[in-house]
Amino acid sequence: MSHTLFLGVGNTLLTDEGAGVHVMQHLRRQAEWDDNVEFLDAGTLSFVLADAIAQATNLIILDAAQIGGTPGCVKTFEGSDFDDFLLGGRRSVHEVGFADLMDIARLQDCLPEKRALIGIQPGDCGWGEVPGEAVSKAIPHAAALATDILARWQAEPPQEVVNQ
């Protein structure tokens, strides 16, 4: 049975920096989810998240990300694009980077089979509990993308494991 983890990342006290947590909360409120779907407010990341990531078959990270767009721009990175984005040295204010957490999972041979990052370009990251207008408008769109990705993943036939 597959297990999906929606990981909302960010500091909700820094306006747009909290976008990932706001998207995760929006998703959680939008539907009845089965027991195989978990929502986790990751805050600004920590090594303690390694276990939750290792237990996931499907991982969708939601975060404010420097994607080179205008504030509120949403971009999805999936599979190898996800890995390439993390290896690209994304600037992060988080205690631990995604690349570090993925390296831990990879070293433990527990990397989620399917993984994606949905990033929202932040504008203002000053003090405030509410994202700016552009990021606020992007939250439902980012949540819809996450739902679409999960639906597509669930519709795909299971991958056959080949023992070598």
Image: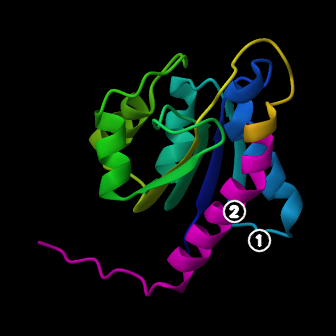
Q: Assess disc 2: are there few (<14), some (14-19) or many (≥20) residues with their C-alpha within 10 Å of its C-alpha.
A: some
User: Is residue 79 covered in magenta?
Assistant: no
From this viewpoint, which residue is outermost toward the left? 164
Q: Quadrant of residue 89?
A: top left
Label ID, residue 54: none
Amino acid marked by disc 1: Asp
From this viewpoint, which residue is outermost toward the front? 70
- Circles 1 and 2: CB atoms closer than 8 Å: yes
Q: Is residue 161 visible?
A: yes
Q: Give me the residue at 71% from left, 58% from top.
A: 141
Q: Give me the residue at 38% from left, 49% from top.
A: 82
Q: Label 1: which residue?
A: 34
Q: Give me the residue at 73% from left, 39% from top.
A: 135
Give whichever of 83, 112 is nearer the camera: 83
- Overall secondary structure of the magenta section: helix
Q: Secondary structure at mark 1?
A: loop
Give whichever of 153, 84 is nearer the camera: 84
Q: Assess disc 1: are there few (<14), some (14-19) or many (≥20) residues with their C-alpha within 10 Å of its C-alpha.
A: few
Between the C-alphas of marks 1 and 2, the distance is 6 Å
Amino acid marked by disc 2: Val
Q: Position of residue 39 (x, y in %)?
A: 72, 50
Instruction: Tally the marks.
Output: 2
Relative vertical location of residue 141 with respect to residue 155 in this rendering, above or below: above
Give the magenta part as a residue range.
135-164
Q: Secondary structure at mark 2?
A: strand
Q: Label 2: which residue?
A: 37
User: Is residue 147 covered in magenta?
Assistant: yes
Give whichever of 78, 113 is nearer the camera: 78
Relative vertical location of residue 31 with respect to residue 159 in this rendering, above or below: above
Q: Position of residue 22 (x, y in %)?
A: 78, 41
